[in-house]
Image (spheres, helix red, strand yellow):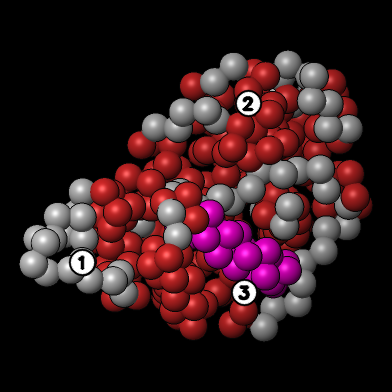
Amino acid sequence: MSRWKWLQVAAVVPLSFVEAKVLPTMFGGGRYHHESAAKPPQPVTTADVDAEIRKQDLRIFEAIAREFPDDYDAMLRKITAAAQTGSEADVRNTSRQAVADLRHRYAPLLPSAPNSEVSQALSAQLDMLNHVMARETPATCNNYLRNGPDAISAPGHDFLADLDRIGATLFHAFGVAKRSGLPAAVPSDQDWSLVADVFTKIGGTPAEMEAISNAKQDFPGLCPAMAKFYEAALLLQGEPGWHIKTALLHAIVKN
């Protein structure tokens, strides 16, 4: 349904390994920086980058490597090239863009992801939204719904952990969808009516539904309303629930 296309909570890769771990090691405090004058610094290799990524135990990169090994190898080569010739900002931007490109490439697969995988991925989105609501002002949370994690000025470790889970569940869903052979899930008007009924039963109001449908960014309760709507989608059983969860997740991810 076109009215849901405004949803833009992006599944952005947590760049803690680049910003807090890999970059200091490679550029500002590790073995490359402190080599003696008698032994020139060795160039960064793909094996170095891979080792640093895996050392951080980030689930999103584990999922990419498992589900799309060729894409993971290509990403390593891009990051390595940036590390060899560019600045820290170049490495950050290359890493972010590489994951974003993969996310956009595989987002069209989501309608064929099984219910269990889309449920996990939408649950991760709901957990993040609840986290943002608990930590930020309503205005910042509304901005998060529109612009994704870039709306958060100083994300903490737990915030990055939520982002990691979002990314991991999404790439797992992409991989399972690629193998599933399922027809694309397309929600009907009846499916939307059913989830609206569940939304009402768990406390959703007509004003909240109207704010969601029309993307009212100035509505002070937009984030709680969206959280309730995600919850309603997760509660809706059977094929209608699968259709709605898939449609919501697809709208979130493809932007």
Q: Residues within 10 Å of mark 3 (few under 14, many from 20)?
A: many
| Residue 102 position within the rendered picture, expressed as x and y whole percent measured from the top left | 60, 68
| Residue 171 position within the rendered picture, expressed as x and y whole percent measured from the top left | 53, 65
Of mark 2 and mark 1, the one earlier in the sequence is: 1
The residue that label 3 is drawn on is 177
Of mark 3 and mark 1, the one earlier in the sequence is: 1
Give the label, 3 or 1, closer to the camera: 1
Q: Quadrant of residue 200?
A: top right
Residue at 81%, 43% in the rendered image? 6
Q: Label 1 near label 3: C-beta < 8 Å?
A: no
Numbered circle sitting on residue 49: none
Q: Is residue 135 visible?
A: yes
The residue under label 1 is which amino acid type? Pro
The residue under label 3 is which amino acid type? Ala
Q: Secondary structure at mark 1?
A: loop
The residue that label 1 is drawn on is 41
Q: Residues within 10 Å of mark 1 (few under 14, many from 20)?
A: few
Q: Quadrant of residue 212?
A: top right
| Residue 101 position within the rendered picture, expressed as x and y whole percent measured from the top left | 63, 65
Side of 79 where 173 appears, left or right: right
The residue that label 2 is drawn on is 141
Residue at 54%, 20% in the rendered image? 136
Q: Secondary structure at mark 2?
A: helix
Residue at 33%, 52% in the rendered image? 23
- Magenta stretch bounds: 91-112
In the displayed structure, would residue 29 be above or below residue 243? Answer: above
Q: Does 92 lie within the magenta span?
A: yes
Gap in angstroms between the C-alphas marked 2 and 1? 45 Å
The residue under label 2 is which amino acid type? Cys
User: Who is closer to the viewer here, 131 or 180?
Assistant: 131
User: Who is closer to the viewer here, 234 or 95?
Assistant: 95
